[in-house]
Image (tube, grey):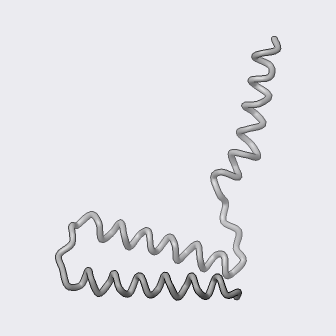
């Protein structure tokens, strides 16, 4: 694991710990806490997938590889016809 990943993990865990202490001492709306937890779970899952060298499909890559060439060929045929 390189230094960037280790530093990111430490900063993320420290930030989460500080947020937990803050949230424990005050009342929080019902919507924000599950949203915060789900976002942190997503960040953690992406981090673990990256460290474990698991490829996660990204929507932008799908758009660039499949949708953009189709749109380009469609527009080329539309304007040259």
**68 relative to 15 in the view: left or right:** right
**57 relative to 32 in the view: left or right:** right
Q: Position of residue 75 (x, y in %)?
A: 74, 23
Q: Position of residue 29 (x, y in %)?
A: 21, 67
Task: Kindly give the residue lying farthest to the left in the view shown.
Answer: 27
Closer-to-camera residue (70/17): 17
Closer-to-camera residue (15/28): 15
- Residue shown at the point (26%, 80%) measured from the top left: 23
Quadrant holding the N terminus: bottom right
Task: Kindly give the residue lying farthest to the top in the view shown.
Answer: 81
Above or below 46: residue 57: above
Closer-to-camera residue (25/40): 25
- Residue shown at the point (70%, 86%) measured from the top left: 2
- Residue shown at the point (76%, 46%) measured from the top left: 65
Q: Residue 69 falls in which quadrant of the image?
A: top right
**72 relative to 32 in the view: left or right:** right
Quadrant holding the C terminus: top right
Above or below 69: residue 63: below
Q: Position of residue 37 (x, y in %)?
A: 38, 73
Counting every numbered tag in the picture gives 0
Q: Position of residue 33 (x, y in %)?
A: 30, 71
- Residue shown at the point (76%, 30%) measured from the top left: 72
**70 relative to 19 in the view: left or right:** right
């Amino acid at each position: 694991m390189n230094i960037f990943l280790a530093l990111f993990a430490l900063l993320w865990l420290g930030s989460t710990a500080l947020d937990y202490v803050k949230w424990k001492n005050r009342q929080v709306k019902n919507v924000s806490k599950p949203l915060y937890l789900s976002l942190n779970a997503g960040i953690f899952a992406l981090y673990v997938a990256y460290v474990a060298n698991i490829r996660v499909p990204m929507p932008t890559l799908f758009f660039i590889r499949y949708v953009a060439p189709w749109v380009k060929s469609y527009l080329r045929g539309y304007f040259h016809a």
